[in-house]
Amino acid sequence: MPITVRICFLLYGIYIGDNKVIHFTRRGQEVGTGTILDHILVSSIPNRSPVPCTNCTPPSEGHGVVSSCLDCFLAGGILYRFEYAVSPAVFLAKARGGTCTLAVSDPDDIVVHRANYLLTNGFGCYNVFKNNCEDFAIYCKTGLLVVDQSTMGQSGQAVSIIGGPLAAVMSTPLRLVTTNVYGMVATAVGVYCASRYAADIGMRTDVMKVSAEDLTTRLTTGLLQVVEPNLAALPPTVS
């Protein structure tokens, strides 16, 4: 049975059986933005061995979808299972994004087909906020794709990163309603949960079901464009 697996709330992939995980990377790197943010992200994930594994498939030229053995994917990290078709109550009870979705998973054979097809044909350019490893895993499981690429992708983790500060900003005007610190915290939490719920792939109206073949055709012809963010003006990564 293919399942979505994750490590440290950052790395996601599709376990297809036979000790294999297909996942999406930034040209072979598990995460990366090309900015100082990488220093924070990389410090939160397991250390990878510099020695190539004979059981893993390196990324093909031009795209970052790879096949790794489960041991290399974990690299000593803790394995978690991403949940699909959870109830609204369960979804909201999980305060951190990137752990579950309201969307329903497709049958196993379709999920495996999508993952294997994208392993050969790619999943476009890696974008930490719009097209990351969680977006890849959710697409493989559901076939759902955000139509408007100018908006946030499917990733619950990315929504959480933006949703926290957004909740603080949006709740600021409400300080006039209550000056009690507990009331302000409760308001911020409520705004954050509402933004997560509305942005979940299972609730959004700007998504459509797209086959893997149609997806790669759209990427090839330019009907669907996902580009890496322009980070030239940002400070370099600190190592």
Image (tube, helix red, strand yellow):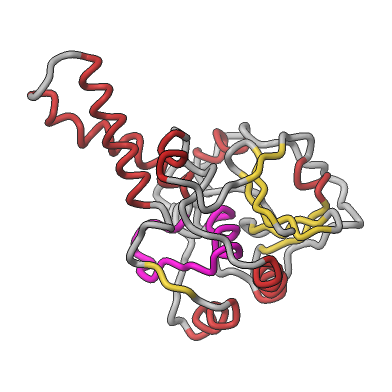
Residue 98, image x, y percentages? 51, 44
The image quarter containing residue 44 is: top right
Identify the residue at image location x=86%, y=52%: 52
Query: Compared to 104, does 76 lie above or below?
Result: above
Q: Position of residue 161 (x, y in %)?
A: 42, 40
**Residue 120 vs residue 38, the one in the foreground:** 120
Report whether 214 appears left or right of 117.
left
Q: Quadrant of residue 237?
A: top right
- In this rendering, the answer to whether 143 lies above or below 217 is above
Q: Position of residue 22 (x, y in %)?
A: 72, 60
Q: Residue at 54% of width from left, 64% of height from top?
A: 142
User: Residue 214: image x %, image y %?
Assistant: 54, 82
Q: Quadrant of the N terminus?
A: bottom right
State which region is magenta: 132-154
The one of 102 and 56 positioned closer to us in this rendering:
102
Task: Say whether residue 115 is left or right of residue 87.
Answer: right
Q: Is residue 131 magenta?
A: no
Taking the magenta stretch, the answer to whether it contains residue 148 is yes
